[in-house]
Amino acid sequence: MGGIIAQEYALAYGDNLRSLILCATFAEPGPFCLKLLEVWEVLASQCGIEATVRDVLLCCFTPGFYEEQPELAKEFDEGVATIGQTAEGFLSQLAAARDHNATDRLADISTPTLVLAGEEDILIPNRQSLRIHEHMPGSEWLTVPGGHAACWEFPDTFNDAVLRFIGRHRGS
C-alpha cells in the first residue's frame, strides 16, 4: 500500500518532493497479484484477519529468513495477534490495491525516482516493480537481497541503497 500511496502523492504533489523511492510495489496489480488479493479476500472473509495476516507474512519473507533469523520471524508471528486491524479495514486495503492503476500516468512523475525491489519478492514479483521503472523515464532500477520485506531481512543492504539514493538528491 505504501508504494501505491507514494505514486498517487507524487502524481498530485510532485513539486513537494526532492526524491521518491517506490519499493516493492506495482503500478497496477496484474494477474498474479489480482489472484493473490482475491485469495486474501476470501481468507479474510471466511477465516478472519489473523489467519490472513499470517498468510501475508509468508509472502513477505523468503524461506531463508525463517531459517536464518528465527527469533525475528517469531517476533513477527507473535505480533500478528496484536495487529489491531479489522477484517473490514483489510478488505478495504485489498480493494484499493486491486483498483489501483497508475501505469499510464507514471511518465508524469518528474521527481527523481528509485524503483527498488527484493530479489525474491513473492508478494509483488519483480516484473511488477520493473514495469514501473519502464514507464518512468529517468527512474533508476535496483534490486536488493530478500523478499517483500527486504528492509527487515537485510536491513544494512536495504538501508545502504536507500541512503545512497537519498544522498544524491539531498538539497542544499
Image (cartoon, grey):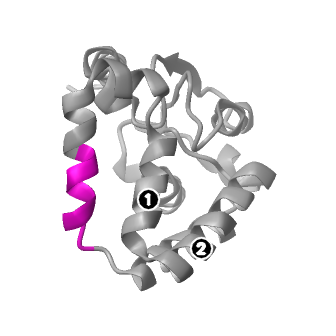
Is residue 82 magenta-colored?
A: yes
Labelled pair 2, 1 in contact (Cβ < 8 Å): no
Q: Main secondary structure of the magenta part?
A: helix
Q: Is residue 170 above or below residue 26?
A: above
Magenta residues, as a range?
A: 76-84
Local packing at callout 2 (Cα closer than 10 Å; few below 14, some 14-19, many 20+) is many
Local packing at callout 1 (Cα closer than 10 Å; few below 14, some 14-19, many 20+) is few
Amino acid bearing label 1 = Tyr
Observer-nearest residue: 82 or 118? 82
Q: Which quadrant would residue 45 be assigned to in this image? A: bottom right
Q: Earlier in the sequence, mark 2 or mark 1?
A: 1
Q: Residue at x 68, y 68 (%)?
A: 38
User: Residue 154: x and y, percent?
Assistant: 32, 20
Q: Residue furthest bottom?
A: 88
Looking at the rendered image, the quarter that the C terminus falls into is top left
- Mark seen at residue 13: 1
Residue 100 visible in the shown view: yes
Amino acid bearing label 2 = Glu
- Report whether 171 appears left or right of 17: left
Q: Residue at x 36, y 21 (%)?
A: 67
Q: Is residue 88 above or below residue 133?
A: below
Q: Which quadrant would residue 79 be assigned to in this image? A: bottom left
Q: What residue sits right under mark 2 in the picture?
A: 41
User: Residue 87: x and y, percent?
Assistant: 42, 80
Residue 14 visible in the shown view: no
User: Residue 116: x and y, percent?
Assistant: 50, 28
